[in-house]
Image: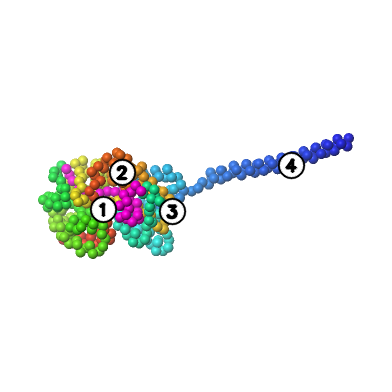
């Protein structure tokens, strides 16, 4: 009887211990299960936020339309990065953006919340002198290896050329049957067809600026178009004499429209038969019916200037890794095809890296133009043009 009672007592004790241990084990499992299930839940409710950077750019509506297409494409492929575009309409002036980056640097405030900046060659070279831009390479941006090395060398790797255009002769083929092929032939045509040619004030648009620079540098060595030494100004006299002589034969005997669009409007209305114009603007406006279908283009020999529009990364930006990822996308063949189709311009990367149909569409059109890089001499040139040509 004693043994039976002892056995029952022992069994009861073992049961209590087993129950206790089982409870502890269950609690441990429950805690572990809860912790493991809580971890994904917390990650779901608090996902990692994408890195957002600010992108400042300027231009006409077609430039805005381009970025309105490319940015969503990029963000869909790269959900960890968000682009905040800041559009400055053409004609309102992009200089305040550059000044803001410069002022932020001087005040020790980074890049002024500007992480990517689009502009022309003059501000690439100016920013290089002011030590504003990050030096770029294919180590940071893989697709940069598809850009012409000569272009990158010309800008000391301080920017990404993402699209390009050229100034060409645009003319009404219904009225102009013998189209000039050289600069001398063009100047003779202007004299023989008074008031049928126009170029815009060079301070208001690149096509007029190109016409002026091409006339001035016609009389200088070929390498002079890459020389920003102030002593070059002493060699401009012959070019300015030519421009003054042509002044009495251009539209209105010396009327120079404002902006690139000003001369395109004169061509569209039939007031003039020939102008210098950006190729992308001509193609875009012919496609939209804003210029007559009789509008044709031709590049001269030697050619007017042309070249890329650039994207610069402020050296003091804190979002550079995200910006590099975006730039790598922008100069991919996929994005560059969108650039070509929407902007009617040349791709920023070498044509050999583009799809064959794009390469074929540019046969003969991508040759002939020259890239001028005269730095701050451009301001001196336009200032002298205003005092000696426009004021005569």
Q: Which residue is mark 3?
A: 319
The magenta segment is 145-173
Left or right: residue 174 compared with residue 137: left
Nearer the camera: disc 1 or disc 2 = 2
Which residue occupies 29% across, 46% down?
A: 346
Q: CA distance from mark 3 to mark 4?
A: 56 Å
Q: Which residue is mark 2?
A: 352
Q: CA distance from mark 4 to mark 2?
A: 76 Å
Q: Which residue is mark 4?
A: 20
> How many residues crowd mark 4 within 10 Å: few (<14), some (14–19), many (20+)?
few
Which badge, 1 or 4, comes first in the chain's sequence? 4
Q: Position of residue 214 (x, y in %)?
A: 20, 55
Say which quadrant the C terminus sits in: bottom left
> How many residues crowd mark 1 within 10 Å: few (<14), some (14–19), many (20+)?
some
Between 335 and 382, the one lying in front of the other is 335
Nearer the camera: disc 1 or disc 4 = 1
> How many residues crowd mark 2 within 10 Å: few (<14), some (14–19), many (20+)?
few
Q: Position of residue 370 (x, y in %)?
A: 24, 52
Q: CA distance from mark 1 to mark 3?
A: 31 Å
Q: Position of residue 313 (x, y in %)?
A: 38, 54
Q: Is residue 163 magenta?
A: yes
Which badge, 4 or 2, comes first in the chain's sequence? 4
Q: Are marks 1 and 4 in contact (CB under 8 Å)?
A: no
Is disc 2 placed on a helix, strand or loop?
helix
Between 247 and 381, the one lying in front of the other is 381
Q: Which residue is mark 1?
A: 371
């Amino acid at each position: 009887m004693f043994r039976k009672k002892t056995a029952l007592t022992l069994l009861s004790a073992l049961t209590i211990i087993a129950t206790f241990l089982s409870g502890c084990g269950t609690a441990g499992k429950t805690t572990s299960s809860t912790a493991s299930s809580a971890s994904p839940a917390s990650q779901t409710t608090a996902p990692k936020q994408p890195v957002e950077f600010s992108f400042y750019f300027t231009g006409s509506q077609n430039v805005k339309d381009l970025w309105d297409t490319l940015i969503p494409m990029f963000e869909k492929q790269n959900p960890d990065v968000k682009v905040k575009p800041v559009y400055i309409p053409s004609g309102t002036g992009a200089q305040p953006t550059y000044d803001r980056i410069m002022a932020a640097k001087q005040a020790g405030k980074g890049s002024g919340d500007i992480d990517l900046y689009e502009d022309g060659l003059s501000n690439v070279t100016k920013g290089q002198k002011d030590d504003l831009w990050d030096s770029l390479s294919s180590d940071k941006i893989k697709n940069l290896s598809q850009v012409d090395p000569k272009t990158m060398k010309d800008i000391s790797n301080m920017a990404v050329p993402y699209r390009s255009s050229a100034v060409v002769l645009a003319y009404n083929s219904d009225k102009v049957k013998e189209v000039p092929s050289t600069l001398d032939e063009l100047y003779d045509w202007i004299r023989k067809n008074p008031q049928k040619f126009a170029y815009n004030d060079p301070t208001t648009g690149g096509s007029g600026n190109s016409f002026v620079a091409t006339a001035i540098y016609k009389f200088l060595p070929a390498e002079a178009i890459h020389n920003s030494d102030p002593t070059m100004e002493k060699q401009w006299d012959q070019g300015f004499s030519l421009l003054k002589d042509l002044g009495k034969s251009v539209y209105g005997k010396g009327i120079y429209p404002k902006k690139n669009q000003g001369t395109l409007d004169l061509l569209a209305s039939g007031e003039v038969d020939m102008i210098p114009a950006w190729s992308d603007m001509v193609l875009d406006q012919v496609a939209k019916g804003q210029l007559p279908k009789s509008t044709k283009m031709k590049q001269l020999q030697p050619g007017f200037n042309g070249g890329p529009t650039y994207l610069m990364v402020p050296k003091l930006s804190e979002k550079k890794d995200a910006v590099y990822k975006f730039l790598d996308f922008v100069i991919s063949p996929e994005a560059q095809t969108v650039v070509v189709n929407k902007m009617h311009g040349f791709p920023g990367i070498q044509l050999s890296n583009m799809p064959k149909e794009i390469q074929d569409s540019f046969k003969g059109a991508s040759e002939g133009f020259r890239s001028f890089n005269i730095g701050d001499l451009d301001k001196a040139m336009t200032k002298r043009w205003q005092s000696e040509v426009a004021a005569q």
